[in-house]
Amino acid sequence: MVNEIALHEAGLNSIWSRILQYDLALIAASKEQCIHCVYPQRDKEVNGIYTNDENEYRTKLLRAKLLKHRFGVDKIDGTNIEKLSTSNAKHLDENSFLVINLKNDPNFKDKLIELGKEFCQDAVWIKEKDNDFYLYGTNYASEPGFGNRLPAGGKFLDGIRQMFIAKLKYPPYPFPEQICKQINSKNPNTPLIEAFFESFNVYTDSGQKVKHFSINAMLYISLMSKEDICYK
């Protein structure tokens, strides 16, 4: 039996342990319009507009396919966005999925990329174990471009903020100077999310209080760069 992981119910340490142990990905199925697709879409003609009901069905179908691969799956509310780095960035208030490679499938990345192409997504976010997230293009949209691999943060920062900030009870930035000092003291090759959590734990262990930290906040941080987190 395949178990669906409820990370929303998990504590910070549980989330952190999964980040360390497994490959991760963020993927969605929603589309505003049927364009730029690598494969013809069975449910829509080229240039057709998707309805909310159609996107809801696509999301359920994607979830079923992820579970069939025996991946851990958690629903992340309202984190899908198209045209991520452009002034026309479009937030789709639909669900994305955090996908966890629980069985250490060596083809995890390839399977997620193939699903990105199948559902005509501009890109999927992928985090291989011991590395930072990157964006991988899975259709013919100009950004990031089919088959292109681009680092998180940077020119995608505004789009990333649109993905998450409406869902965060307390915006998790800028971070206290003490956390940034801890992050900056780490080896430059340390993945950002690892450096952040180590620094975050030092900060909270010292008696400092953090009002709110959620799975959405964790993902938001994971998709940023060090410079994005610790700006003045």
Image (cartoon, grey):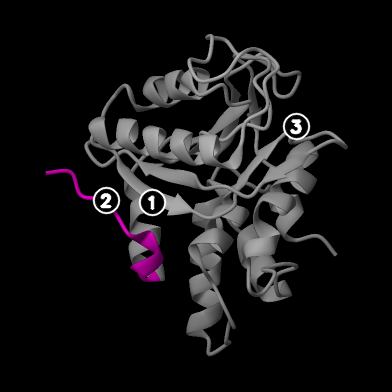
Q: Residue at x 70, y 23 (%)?
A: 144
Label 1 belongs to which residue?
74
Contact (Cβ within 8 Å) of mark 2 with mark 3: no
Q: Residue at x 58, y 81 (%)?
A: 210
Q: Amino acid at mark 1?
A: Asp
Give the quadrant of the C terminus.
bottom right
Give the quadrant of the N terminus.
top left
Please, is residue 213 above or below residue 131 in the view?
below
- Mark 2 Cα within 10 Å, few/some/many (few <14, many 20+)? some
Q: Helix, strand, or loop for circle 1?
A: strand
**Magenta includes 207?**
no
Whole-angstrom CA distance, mark 2 to mark 3, is: 30 Å
Label 2 belongs to which residue?
4
N-terminal-most mark, 2 or 3: 2
* One can see residue 132 in this view: no
N-terminal-most mark, 3 or 1: 1
Q: Residue at x 40, y 65 (%)?
A: 8
N-terminal-most mark, 1 or 2: 2
Magenta residues? 1-11
Please, is residue 232 above or below residue 3 in the view?
below
Q: Which mark is residue 83?
A: 3
In the visual, does 231 lie left or right of 40? Answer: right
Q: Residue furthest left?
A: 1
Q: Residue at x 57, y 50 (%)?
A: 222
Contact (Cβ within 8 Å) of mark 1 with mark 2: yes
